[in-house]
Amino acid sequence: MHLSKEEIARYSRHLIMPEVGMDGQLKLKNAKVLLIGTGGLGAPVAMYLAAAGVGTLGVIDFDTVDASNLQRQIIHGTKDIGKKKVDSAEETMKDINPFVNVVKYEVPLTSANALEILKDYDIVADGTDNFPTRFLVNDACVLLGKPNVYASIFRFEGQATVFCKDEGPCYRCLYPEPPPPGLVPSCAEGGVLGILPGVVGLIQATEVIKLILGEGQPLQGRLMLYDALAMKFRELKIRRNPECQGKCSVVKELIDYQQFCGVPHQEAPLPAPVASTDIEPQEVKQLIDAGSDFVLIDVREVHEHQICNIPKARLMPLGDLPKRLNEIDKNADIVMHCKMGGRSAKACDLLRQNGFTRVRNMKGGILAWSDKVDPSVPKY
Amino acid sequence: MPKILIPTPLRQFAGKNDSVEVAGATVGEALAALTTAHPDLKKNLYNDEGKLRSFVNVYMNDEDIRFLEKEKTAVGSNDTISIVPSIAGGR
Protein backbone atom coordinates (compact mmCIF):
# COMPACT_ATOMS: atom_id res chain seq x y z
CA MET A 1 0.00 0.00 0.00
CA HIS A 2 1.33 3.40 -0.92
CA LEU A 3 0.05 6.90 -1.69
CA SER A 4 -0.18 8.15 -5.26
CA LYS A 5 1.30 11.50 -6.29
CA GLU A 6 -2.21 13.02 -6.17
CA GLU A 7 -2.83 11.66 -2.69
CA ILE A 8 0.48 13.02 -1.43
CA ALA A 9 -0.47 16.47 -2.71
CA ARG A 10 -3.91 16.18 -1.11
CA TYR A 11 -2.67 15.06 2.31
CA SER A 12 0.46 17.25 2.51
CA ARG A 13 -0.69 19.06 5.69
CA HIS A 14 -0.99 15.68 7.36
CA LEU A 15 2.23 14.31 5.94
CA ILE A 16 4.37 17.13 7.32
CA MET A 17 3.15 16.49 10.88
CA PRO A 18 5.18 13.83 12.67
CA GLU A 19 2.06 12.64 14.58
CA VAL A 20 0.52 11.63 11.25
CA GLY A 21 3.23 11.48 8.58
CA MET A 22 3.32 8.83 5.86
CA ASP A 23 2.76 6.00 8.36
CA GLY A 24 -0.30 7.69 9.82
CA GLN A 25 -1.75 8.58 6.44
CA LEU A 26 -1.38 4.97 5.34
CA LYS A 27 -3.11 3.86 8.56
CA LEU A 28 -5.97 6.20 7.66
CA LYS A 29 -6.09 4.82 4.13
CA ASN A 30 -6.19 1.25 5.44
CA ALA A 31 -8.85 2.01 8.05
CA LYS A 32 -12.47 0.91 7.75
CA VAL A 33 -14.97 2.96 9.71
CA LEU A 34 -18.72 2.33 9.87
CA LEU A 35 -21.01 5.31 10.41
CA ILE A 36 -24.42 4.41 11.83
CA GLY A 37 -26.70 7.14 10.50
CA THR A 38 -25.91 9.99 8.10
CA GLY A 39 -27.95 12.55 9.98
CA GLY A 40 -26.91 15.39 12.26
CA LEU A 41 -23.91 13.61 13.75
CA GLY A 42 -23.15 11.34 10.79
CA ALA A 43 -22.98 14.28 8.36
CA PRO A 44 -19.93 16.10 9.75
CA VAL A 45 -18.26 12.82 10.74
CA ALA A 46 -18.60 11.43 7.21
CA MET A 47 -17.40 14.62 5.56
CA TYR A 48 -14.33 15.12 7.73
CA LEU A 49 -13.32 11.46 7.75
CA ALA A 50 -13.62 11.42 3.96
CA ALA A 51 -11.53 14.59 3.75
CA ALA A 52 -8.92 13.15 6.11
CA GLY A 53 -8.47 10.14 3.84
CA VAL A 54 -10.06 7.30 5.82
CA GLY A 55 -9.92 4.60 3.12
CA THR A 56 -13.24 2.82 3.62
CA LEU A 57 -16.31 4.49 5.06
CA GLY A 58 -19.50 2.47 5.51
CA VAL A 59 -22.74 4.43 5.84
CA ILE A 60 -26.00 2.95 7.11
CA ASP A 61 -29.25 4.84 6.66
CA PHE A 62 -32.61 3.91 5.20
CA ASP A 63 -34.06 7.38 5.32
CA THR A 64 -34.56 9.94 2.55
CA VAL A 65 -33.54 13.59 2.71
CA ASP A 66 -36.28 15.87 4.01
CA ALA A 67 -36.34 19.67 4.09
CA SER A 68 -36.35 19.61 7.91
CA ASN A 69 -32.96 17.81 7.86
CA LEU A 70 -31.09 20.62 6.13
CA GLN A 71 -30.89 22.90 9.17
CA ARG A 72 -28.09 20.63 10.45
CA GLN A 73 -27.34 17.67 8.14
CA ILE A 74 -24.82 19.53 6.03
CA ILE A 75 -23.82 16.51 3.97
CA HIS A 76 -27.19 16.89 2.19
CA GLY A 77 -28.28 19.94 0.21
CA THR A 78 -31.49 21.42 -1.12
CA LYS A 79 -31.04 19.59 -4.42
CA ASP A 80 -30.99 16.27 -2.47
CA ILE A 81 -34.49 16.54 -0.97
CA GLY A 82 -36.26 13.25 -1.65
CA LYS A 83 -33.03 11.37 -2.41
CA LYS A 84 -31.84 8.41 -0.39
CA LYS A 85 -29.56 9.69 2.34
CA VAL A 86 -26.87 7.12 1.60
CA ASP A 87 -26.76 8.25 -2.04
CA SER A 88 -26.67 11.92 -1.17
CA ALA A 89 -23.97 11.29 1.46
CA GLU A 90 -21.87 9.28 -0.96
CA GLU A 91 -22.06 12.03 -3.56
CA THR A 92 -20.79 14.65 -1.10
CA MET A 93 -18.05 12.40 0.30
CA LYS A 94 -16.84 11.45 -3.18
CA ASP A 95 -16.85 15.09 -4.17
CA ILE A 96 -14.70 15.98 -1.15
CA ASN A 97 -12.37 13.04 -1.72
CA PRO A 98 -12.66 10.64 -4.67
CA PHE A 99 -9.99 8.40 -3.14
CA VAL A 100 -12.30 7.07 -0.39
CA ASN A 101 -14.32 3.94 -0.84
CA VAL A 102 -17.92 4.48 0.32
CA VAL A 103 -19.94 1.37 1.17
CA LYS A 104 -23.67 2.00 1.40
CA TYR A 105 -26.20 0.05 3.47
CA GLU A 106 -29.72 1.22 2.80
CA VAL A 107 -31.26 -0.87 5.56
CA PRO A 108 -32.28 -0.45 9.15
CA LEU A 109 -29.64 -1.97 11.45
CA THR A 110 -31.22 -4.97 13.20
CA SER A 111 -30.22 -7.87 15.40
CA ALA A 112 -30.34 -10.03 12.26
CA ASN A 113 -27.82 -8.02 10.21
CA ALA A 114 -25.72 -6.07 12.73
CA LEU A 115 -22.93 -8.60 13.33
CA GLU A 116 -22.62 -9.33 9.62
CA ILE A 117 -22.32 -5.62 8.74
CA LEU A 118 -20.09 -4.56 11.65
CA LYS A 119 -17.59 -7.42 11.40
CA ASP A 120 -15.75 -5.93 8.41
CA TYR A 121 -14.97 -2.64 10.15
CA ASP A 122 -12.26 -1.51 12.56
CA ILE A 123 -14.24 1.24 14.28
CA VAL A 124 -17.94 2.05 14.62
CA ALA A 125 -19.23 5.61 15.02
CA ASP A 126 -22.75 5.61 16.46
CA GLY A 127 -24.86 8.62 15.55
CA THR A 128 -28.34 7.13 15.59
CA ASP A 129 -31.36 8.72 17.18
CA ASN A 130 -33.06 6.04 19.25
CA PHE A 131 -32.40 3.84 22.26
CA PRO A 132 -33.02 0.42 20.66
CA THR A 133 -30.31 1.08 18.03
CA ARG A 134 -27.94 2.52 20.66
CA PHE A 135 -28.15 -0.71 22.66
CA LEU A 136 -27.95 -2.84 19.52
CA VAL A 137 -24.80 -1.06 18.30
CA ASN A 138 -23.25 -1.33 21.75
CA ASP A 139 -23.96 -5.01 22.13
CA ALA A 140 -22.72 -5.83 18.63
CA CYS A 141 -19.49 -3.90 19.37
CA VAL A 142 -19.08 -5.79 22.67
CA LEU A 143 -19.55 -9.15 20.97
CA LEU A 144 -17.19 -8.30 18.11
CA GLY A 145 -14.67 -6.38 20.24
CA LYS A 146 -14.93 -3.20 18.11
CA PRO A 147 -14.46 0.27 19.56
CA ASN A 148 -17.68 2.30 19.47
CA VAL A 149 -17.13 6.04 19.17
CA TYR A 150 -20.31 7.35 20.68
CA ALA A 151 -22.07 10.70 20.64
CA SER A 152 -25.62 11.84 21.31
CA ILE A 153 -27.31 15.21 21.27
CA PHE A 154 -30.42 16.87 22.60
CA ARG A 155 -31.48 20.48 22.02
CA PHE A 156 -28.23 22.24 22.99
CA GLU A 157 -26.42 19.52 24.90
CA GLY A 158 -24.18 16.73 23.72
CA GLN A 159 -22.50 13.66 25.19
CA ALA A 160 -19.51 11.85 23.71
CA THR A 161 -17.21 9.00 24.69
CA VAL A 162 -15.40 5.92 23.36
CA PHE A 163 -16.96 2.61 24.39
CA CYS A 164 -15.70 -0.97 24.10
CA LYS A 165 -12.08 -0.12 23.46
CA ASP A 166 -9.90 -2.88 24.87
CA GLU A 167 -11.19 -3.49 28.39
CA GLY A 168 -12.91 -0.11 28.68
CA PRO A 169 -16.51 0.46 29.72
CA CYS A 170 -19.45 0.00 27.36
CA TYR A 171 -22.76 1.80 27.00
CA ARG A 172 -24.38 -0.60 29.45
CA CYS A 173 -21.77 0.30 32.07
CA LEU A 174 -22.92 3.91 31.76
CA TYR A 175 -26.63 3.26 31.36
CA PRO A 176 -27.68 -0.30 32.24
CA GLU A 177 -31.26 0.18 31.08
CA PRO A 178 -33.13 2.33 28.59
CA PRO A 179 -35.65 4.88 29.76
CA PRO A 180 -39.30 3.91 29.37
CA PRO A 181 -40.64 5.03 25.98
CA GLY A 182 -41.89 8.59 25.94
CA LEU A 183 -39.93 9.84 28.93
CA VAL A 184 -36.89 11.10 27.01
CA PRO A 185 -37.93 13.10 23.94
CA SER A 186 -36.16 12.60 20.60
CA CYS A 187 -34.71 15.44 18.53
CA ALA A 188 -37.84 15.30 16.37
CA GLU A 189 -39.93 16.04 19.46
CA GLY A 190 -37.55 18.16 21.52
CA GLY A 191 -35.71 19.96 18.76
CA VAL A 192 -31.99 20.37 18.28
CA LEU A 193 -29.84 23.43 17.70
CA GLY A 194 -28.59 23.02 14.12
CA ILE A 195 -24.92 23.66 14.87
CA LEU A 196 -24.83 21.33 17.89
CA PRO A 197 -24.23 18.09 15.94
CA GLY A 198 -21.40 19.86 14.12
CA VAL A 199 -19.45 20.40 17.34
CA VAL A 200 -20.35 17.04 18.87
CA GLY A 201 -19.91 15.10 15.63
CA LEU A 202 -16.41 16.48 15.23
CA ILE A 203 -15.51 15.30 18.73
CA GLN A 204 -16.56 11.90 17.42
CA ALA A 205 -14.53 12.31 14.22
CA THR A 206 -11.49 13.43 16.25
CA GLU A 207 -11.68 10.31 18.40
CA VAL A 208 -11.99 8.10 15.32
CA ILE A 209 -8.85 9.64 13.80
CA LYS A 210 -6.95 9.31 17.11
CA LEU A 211 -7.89 5.65 17.41
CA ILE A 212 -6.71 4.96 13.87
CA LEU A 213 -3.45 6.81 14.37
CA GLY A 214 -2.92 5.45 17.88
CA GLU A 215 -2.08 8.99 18.99
CA GLY A 216 -3.15 10.93 22.08
CA GLN A 217 -5.45 9.91 24.91
CA PRO A 218 -8.70 8.39 23.70
CA LEU A 219 -11.94 9.63 25.28
CA GLN A 220 -12.28 6.28 26.99
CA GLY A 221 -13.71 5.91 30.49
CA ARG A 222 -14.65 9.57 30.29
CA LEU A 223 -17.99 11.09 29.35
CA MET A 224 -17.60 14.47 27.68
CA LEU A 225 -20.58 16.74 28.24
CA TYR A 226 -21.00 19.82 26.09
CA ASP A 227 -23.46 22.61 26.84
CA ALA A 228 -23.67 25.02 23.90
CA LEU A 229 -25.62 27.69 25.76
CA ALA A 230 -23.16 27.90 28.63
CA MET A 231 -20.29 27.07 26.22
CA LYS A 232 -18.91 24.62 28.72
CA PHE A 233 -17.28 21.25 28.38
CA ARG A 234 -17.30 18.95 31.40
CA GLU A 235 -15.87 15.54 31.88
CA LEU A 236 -17.22 12.74 34.08
CA LYS A 237 -15.73 9.33 34.80
CA ILE A 238 -17.28 6.19 33.35
CA ARG A 239 -16.36 3.07 35.30
CA ARG A 240 -16.54 -0.41 33.94
CA ASN A 241 -19.22 -2.59 35.52
CA PRO A 242 -17.23 -4.30 38.32
CA GLU A 243 -18.87 -7.63 37.45
CA CYS A 244 -17.25 -7.60 34.01
CA GLN A 245 -13.85 -9.15 34.72
CA GLY A 246 -12.02 -9.42 31.43
CA LYS A 247 -15.24 -10.17 29.59
CA CYS A 248 -18.61 -8.44 29.53
CA SER A 249 -20.94 -10.10 32.02
CA VAL A 250 -24.11 -8.65 30.55
CA VAL A 251 -24.07 -9.02 26.76
CA LYS A 252 -24.20 -12.65 25.60
CA GLU A 253 -26.00 -12.32 22.28
CA LEU A 254 -28.09 -9.83 20.35
CA ILE A 255 -31.66 -9.59 21.61
CA ASP A 256 -34.93 -7.98 20.56
CA TYR A 257 -34.05 -4.34 21.23
CA GLN A 258 -37.46 -2.93 20.42
CA GLN A 259 -38.87 -5.13 23.15
CA PHE A 260 -35.96 -4.35 25.49
CA CYS A 261 -36.70 -0.65 25.12
CA GLY A 262 -40.44 -1.19 25.43
CA VAL A 263 -41.10 0.02 21.89
CA PRO A 264 -44.01 -1.64 20.11
CA HIS A 265 -42.92 -3.73 17.12
CA GLN A 266 -42.67 -1.76 13.93
CA GLU A 267 -42.93 -4.69 11.52
CA ALA A 268 -46.54 -5.48 12.29
CA PRO A 269 -48.25 -2.23 13.20
CA LEU A 270 -51.68 -3.08 14.50
CA PRO A 271 -54.30 -0.59 13.46
CA ALA A 272 -54.62 1.74 16.42
CA PRO A 273 -57.98 1.23 18.04
CA VAL A 274 -60.05 4.31 17.48
CA ALA A 275 -60.87 5.56 20.92
CA SER A 276 -64.38 6.87 21.16
CA THR A 277 -62.84 10.02 22.56
CA ASP A 278 -60.86 10.73 19.39
CA ILE A 279 -62.08 13.15 16.78
CA GLU A 280 -60.80 13.51 13.22
CA PRO A 281 -59.55 16.95 12.11
CA GLN A 282 -62.21 17.00 9.38
CA GLU A 283 -64.94 16.62 12.01
CA VAL A 284 -63.44 19.48 14.00
CA LYS A 285 -63.54 21.59 10.84
CA GLN A 286 -67.23 20.68 10.34
CA LEU A 287 -67.97 21.72 13.92
CA ILE A 288 -66.27 25.06 13.35
CA ASP A 289 -68.03 25.64 10.02
CA ALA A 290 -71.40 24.74 11.54
CA GLY A 291 -70.80 27.27 14.30
CA SER A 292 -71.15 24.55 16.94
CA ASP A 293 -70.67 25.52 20.52
CA PHE A 294 -67.45 23.84 21.62
CA VAL A 295 -64.07 24.79 23.03
CA LEU A 296 -60.91 24.02 21.05
CA ILE A 297 -57.74 24.04 23.15
CA ASP A 298 -54.20 24.00 21.78
CA VAL A 299 -51.86 22.52 24.42
CA ARG A 300 -48.60 23.22 22.55
CA GLU A 301 -46.02 25.76 23.66
CA VAL A 302 -46.14 29.47 22.83
CA HIS A 303 -43.25 29.19 20.34
CA GLU A 304 -45.02 26.39 18.50
CA HIS A 305 -48.25 28.41 18.36
CA GLN A 306 -46.25 31.16 16.65
CA ILE A 307 -45.27 28.74 13.86
CA CYS A 308 -48.84 27.83 13.01
CA ASN A 309 -52.22 27.64 14.69
CA ILE A 310 -55.92 27.08 14.20
CA PRO A 311 -57.58 30.47 14.73
CA LYS A 312 -60.42 29.17 16.89
CA ALA A 313 -58.05 27.34 19.24
CA ARG A 314 -57.19 28.74 22.63
CA LEU A 315 -53.57 28.30 23.65
CA MET A 316 -53.03 26.61 27.02
CA PRO A 317 -49.63 24.86 27.13
CA LEU A 318 -49.79 21.40 28.71
CA GLY A 319 -47.46 22.41 31.54
CA ASP A 320 -49.76 25.30 32.55
CA LEU A 321 -52.97 23.33 32.27
CA PRO A 322 -53.16 22.05 35.88
CA LYS A 323 -53.13 25.65 37.13
CA ARG A 324 -55.63 26.86 34.54
CA LEU A 325 -58.38 24.26 34.79
CA ASN A 326 -60.70 26.81 36.40
CA GLU A 327 -60.63 28.77 33.12
CA ILE A 328 -62.40 25.94 31.30
CA ASP A 329 -66.14 25.35 31.51
CA LYS A 330 -66.77 21.85 32.90
CA ASN A 331 -70.01 21.50 30.95
CA ALA A 332 -68.60 22.50 27.60
CA ASP A 333 -67.76 20.20 24.70
CA ILE A 334 -63.99 20.28 24.61
CA VAL A 335 -61.55 19.29 21.86
CA MET A 336 -57.82 19.29 22.63
CA HIS A 337 -55.04 19.35 20.08
CA CYS A 338 -51.24 19.54 19.97
CA LYS A 339 -48.65 18.90 17.23
CA MET A 340 -49.19 15.17 16.71
CA GLY A 341 -51.75 14.06 19.29
CA GLY A 342 -49.53 12.80 22.14
CA ARG A 343 -49.58 15.78 24.45
CA SER A 344 -53.26 16.46 23.85
CA ALA A 345 -54.02 12.84 24.84
CA LYS A 346 -52.29 13.55 28.17
CA ALA A 347 -54.25 16.78 28.46
CA CYS A 348 -57.53 14.89 27.87
CA ASP A 349 -56.58 12.45 30.65
CA LEU A 350 -55.82 15.34 32.98
CA LEU A 351 -59.18 16.96 32.31
CA ARG A 352 -61.07 13.71 32.82
CA GLN A 353 -59.29 13.13 36.12
CA ASN A 354 -60.56 16.52 37.14
CA GLY A 355 -64.18 15.81 36.41
CA PHE A 356 -64.48 16.97 32.80
CA THR A 357 -66.58 14.48 30.88
CA ARG A 358 -67.01 15.80 27.34
CA VAL A 359 -63.38 15.84 26.25
CA ARG A 360 -62.08 14.67 22.89
CA ASN A 361 -58.59 14.50 21.36
CA MET A 362 -58.05 15.70 17.79
CA LYS A 363 -56.27 12.81 16.07
CA GLY A 364 -52.84 13.54 14.64
CA GLY A 365 -52.71 17.11 15.92
CA ILE A 366 -52.09 20.17 13.79
CA LEU A 367 -49.93 18.12 11.39
CA ALA A 368 -53.02 16.04 10.51
CA TRP A 369 -55.01 19.28 10.28
CA SER A 370 -52.51 20.47 7.67
CA ASP A 371 -52.79 17.18 5.77
CA LYS A 372 -56.53 16.76 5.92
CA VAL A 373 -58.09 20.19 6.34
CA ASP A 374 -55.88 23.14 5.52
CA PRO A 375 -52.68 22.51 3.54
CA SER A 376 -51.70 26.16 3.92
CA VAL A 377 -50.86 25.43 7.59
CA PRO A 378 -47.08 24.89 7.63
CA LYS A 379 -45.74 21.64 9.09
CA TYR A 380 -42.77 21.66 11.41
CA MET B 1 -24.47 24.70 49.90
CA PRO B 2 -23.84 22.02 47.26
CA LYS B 3 -24.84 22.90 43.74
CA ILE B 4 -26.92 20.57 41.56
CA LEU B 5 -26.53 20.95 37.80
CA ILE B 6 -29.80 20.33 35.97
CA PRO B 7 -29.54 18.89 32.43
CA THR B 8 -31.46 20.39 29.52
CA PRO B 9 -34.27 17.80 29.36
CA LEU B 10 -35.12 18.29 33.04
CA ARG B 11 -34.90 22.08 33.25
CA GLN B 12 -38.57 22.41 32.36
CA PHE B 13 -39.34 20.62 35.65
CA ALA B 14 -36.95 22.76 37.69
CA GLY B 15 -38.28 26.23 37.05
CA LYS B 16 -36.05 26.45 33.92
CA ASN B 17 -32.95 26.67 36.14
CA ASP B 18 -29.68 25.19 34.90
CA SER B 19 -28.42 24.82 38.45
CA VAL B 20 -29.94 24.88 41.89
CA GLU B 21 -28.23 25.28 45.27
CA VAL B 22 -29.73 23.13 47.97
CA ALA B 23 -29.08 22.16 51.57
CA GLY B 24 -27.99 18.63 52.37
CA ALA B 25 -25.08 16.66 53.79
CA THR B 26 -25.45 13.71 51.42
CA VAL B 27 -26.35 13.34 47.76
CA GLY B 28 -29.68 11.79 48.81
CA GLU B 29 -30.52 14.73 51.06
CA ALA B 30 -29.55 17.24 48.40
CA LEU B 31 -31.73 15.49 45.80
CA ALA B 32 -34.60 15.30 48.30
CA ALA B 33 -34.31 19.05 48.88
CA LEU B 34 -34.28 19.56 45.11
CA THR B 35 -37.43 17.53 44.52
CA THR B 36 -39.15 19.24 47.44
CA ALA B 37 -38.43 22.61 45.84
CA HIS B 38 -39.39 21.28 42.38
CA PRO B 39 -41.91 18.44 42.86
CA ASP B 40 -42.31 17.87 39.10
CA LEU B 41 -38.75 16.54 39.01
CA LYS B 42 -39.59 13.69 41.31
CA LYS B 43 -41.19 11.33 38.81
CA ASN B 44 -38.36 11.99 36.37
CA LEU B 45 -35.66 11.10 38.89
CA TYR B 46 -37.29 8.37 40.98
CA ASN B 47 -39.37 5.32 40.13
CA ASP B 48 -42.56 4.33 41.96
CA GLU B 49 -40.50 2.54 44.61
CA GLY B 50 -38.63 5.75 45.36
CA LYS B 51 -35.38 4.54 43.82
CA LEU B 52 -33.29 6.59 41.42
CA ARG B 53 -34.17 5.64 37.86
CA SER B 54 -31.52 3.53 36.14
CA PHE B 55 -31.23 5.77 33.08
CA VAL B 56 -30.49 8.79 35.25
CA ASN B 57 -26.92 8.91 36.50
CA VAL B 58 -25.88 11.10 39.39
CA TYR B 59 -22.32 12.32 39.79
CA MET B 60 -20.57 13.88 42.75
CA ASN B 61 -18.06 16.13 41.03
CA ASP B 62 -16.72 13.81 38.30
CA GLU B 63 -17.46 10.47 39.96
CA ASP B 64 -20.58 8.34 39.49
CA ILE B 65 -22.23 7.91 42.91
CA ARG B 66 -22.81 4.22 42.14
CA PHE B 67 -19.06 3.84 42.66
CA LEU B 68 -19.06 5.98 45.82
CA GLU B 69 -21.61 5.46 48.54
CA LYS B 70 -24.59 5.98 46.27
CA GLU B 71 -27.16 8.33 47.80
CA LYS B 72 -25.32 8.25 51.13
CA THR B 73 -22.27 9.90 49.50
CA ALA B 74 -21.30 12.91 51.59
CA VAL B 75 -21.34 16.32 49.93
CA GLY B 76 -19.71 19.56 51.05
CA SER B 77 -20.61 23.12 50.21
CA ASN B 78 -18.08 23.29 47.37
CA ASP B 79 -19.21 20.07 45.71
CA THR B 80 -21.19 19.88 42.51
CA ILE B 81 -23.79 17.21 41.91
CA SER B 82 -24.62 16.49 38.26
CA ILE B 83 -27.71 14.74 36.99
CA VAL B 84 -26.92 13.09 33.65
CA PRO B 85 -29.85 11.38 31.93
CA SER B 86 -29.35 9.21 28.87
CA ILE B 87 -30.12 10.95 25.60
CA ALA B 88 -30.18 9.17 22.27
CA GLY B 89 -30.54 11.91 19.65
CA GLY B 90 -28.23 11.97 16.68
CA ARG B 91 -30.16 12.97 13.64
Image (cartoon, grey):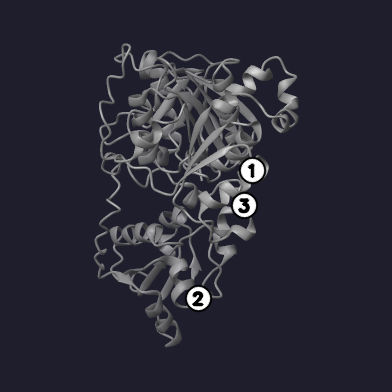
Identity of the amino acid at label 3? Gln
Residue A205 coordinates in the image, percent (x, y):
58, 31
Q: Residues within 10 Å of mark 1 (few under 14, many from 20)?
A: some
Observer-side mark, 2 or 1, equals 1
Q: Nearer the viewer, residue A300 or A30?
A: A30
Q: Which mark is residue A312?
A: 2
Q: Which mark is residue A195?
A: 1
| A55 and A327: which is toward the camera | A55
Mark 2 crowd level (few <14, some 14–19, many ≥20, 10 Å Cα): few
Q: Nearer the viewer, residue A358 or A8?
A: A8
According to the picture, the residue beneath numbered tag 3 turns out to be: A71
Identified by mark 1, the residue type is: Ile
> What amino acid type should be assigned to the residue bearing mark 2?
Lys
Mark earlier in primary sequence (2, 1): 1
Pointers 3 and 1 within a single chain: yes
Q: Left of A89 or right of it: where is A10?
A: right
Q: Quadrant of residue A167?
A: top left
Q: Secondary structure at mark 2?
A: loop
Dot 3 surroundings within 10 Å: few (below 14), some, or many (20 or more)? some
